[in-house]
Image (spheres, rainbow, N blue to C red):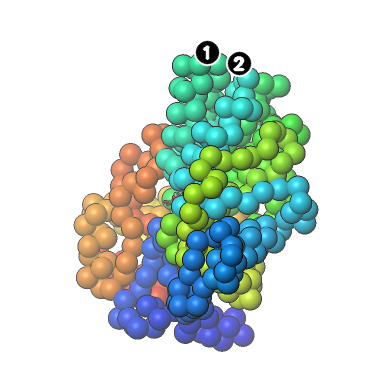
Amino acid sequence: EQERWQRALRAQFPIVTGHPELAYLDSAATAQKPQAVLDAVQTYLTTSNANSARGTYTWANRTTELVERTRGRVARFLGDDRPERSAVHFTGGTTEGLRTIARDWLPGFLRDGDEIVAPDADHQANIVPWLEAQQSLARQGVHVRVVPMPYQSGSGDYDHRALAERAGPRTRFVATTHVHHVYGGDMNVHRIREAVGPDAVICLDAAQSVGHLPVSVAELDVDFVVFSGHKALALPGSGAVWARQARGPEFVPGGWSGTPNTVGIASLEAALDWLEAAGVDRIERWTADLAVRLTEGLRRLDAYEILGCPLSLAADSTVQRRQGIVTLRHRAIDSGDLGFILFSHGFMVRSDHHCQGDAGEKTGSVRVSLHVYNTVEEVDRLLSVLTSLP
Ligand code: PMP
């Protein structure tokens, strides 16, 4: 049943079906696009292409409607049951989204003596903007402290007890990552909320979770959700910030009146429709099961070290589940070399440091990241190549 469902979905990715000799295992970097997304782009460009909000003619009006409709689409996709009290702002991706919050919103929210909690072993896109905000505020005489998000270990498991000890009444903004892009675990955001209290703003870097597992703002009680369209089956250069307008000032980013990436927005609408029809919960199950299969196979091979959260998690872990990302190291082969070896067998993986922040892994690694188009057969074939290496 699951396999039939997956085969039907995989068949909708022309780049995947067109290259049966290759296995794309780098979806955490960017995802492949289903035909429905390619069609939506073609249809938009051949029937309605115009600038938005300039409406005295049909194409412009259609474009304006597309942009506004997709704002609502994003809110619904994120489980927002009160969209009248939130805002969706389109961005070029997660990096731009986080920077926009840091530059356009955070300075109006923080006061002298406040604290920001920010990760230091997550993706750099979720570290640098907060440090930059701290520096630019300091130049204006507003001093805020950046407190590193504590980890239990090098596994991407946040230490919520240590966080609760560090957090005080001045902790007003917490930047957290939903699914770690190297370690592959998804954070239990409720534990972070409990640790920092009801008034702190929580900003969720959802680059690796939107499109991979259900993300519900109603359930998570976060204030910002930031993601990239290209990792969620849409075009590069699309993405969004969802902002709840409750715990701080309204989120009104600068550059509001510029021309939006209408083609990217058309692709995002189609991608979210496709993901919802496919069933994000089923996609999560599929990719998490593949990751378990790969991890179990790797555990039998002494030559490899597996980074990230273990398969059986401690009861007090902040991580809920290993998602579809498995990062490994061969004890003797350099990660770059391993990447080349794997590509000589048709596997496309990512090898290096994966843009991880300063406190992250110092040695490179190979990351295998999965999406709905990946198969059990690909994982088994990968395991047999990994097994054959000395
Ligand atoms: N955060 C995380 C967790 C990521 O994995 C990535 C992309 N690798 C980013 C942020 C940055 O996303 P983008 O390059 O699309 O801006």
Mark 1 Cβ and ligand 1 under 8 Å apart: no
Type of amino acid under label 1: Gly
Horizontal side, residue 72 vs residue 27: left or right: right
In the structure shown, which secondary structural element does the residue marked by tag 2 occupy?
loop
The structure residue drawn at horizontal position 50% and vertical position 61%, both measured from the top left corner, is 51
Residue 147 seen from this side: yes
Residue 23 spot, x, y in % from top left? 35, 74
Where 279 sits versus 355, above or below? below
Task: Identify which residue, 332 or 60, lies in the foreground.
Answer: 60
| Extreme residue toward the top, this view | 141
The tag earlier along the polypeptide, 2 or 1, is: 2
Horizontal side, residue 373 vs residue 78: left or right: left
Task: Identify which residue, 13 or 328, lies in the foreground.
Answer: 13
Residue 275 seen from this side: no
Residue 141 spot, x, y in % from top left? 52, 13
Task: Identify which residue, 281 or 265, lies in the foreground.
Answer: 265
Question: In which quarter of the view is residue 166 placed?
Answer: top right
Type of amino acid under label 2: Asp
- Callout 2–callout 1 Cβ contact below 8 Å: yes
Residue under pointer 1: 141
The structure residue drawn at horizontal position 31% and vertical position 76%, both measured from the top left corner, is 22
Where 239 sits versus 35, above or below? above
In the structure shown, which secondary structural element does the residue marked by tag 1 occupy?
loop
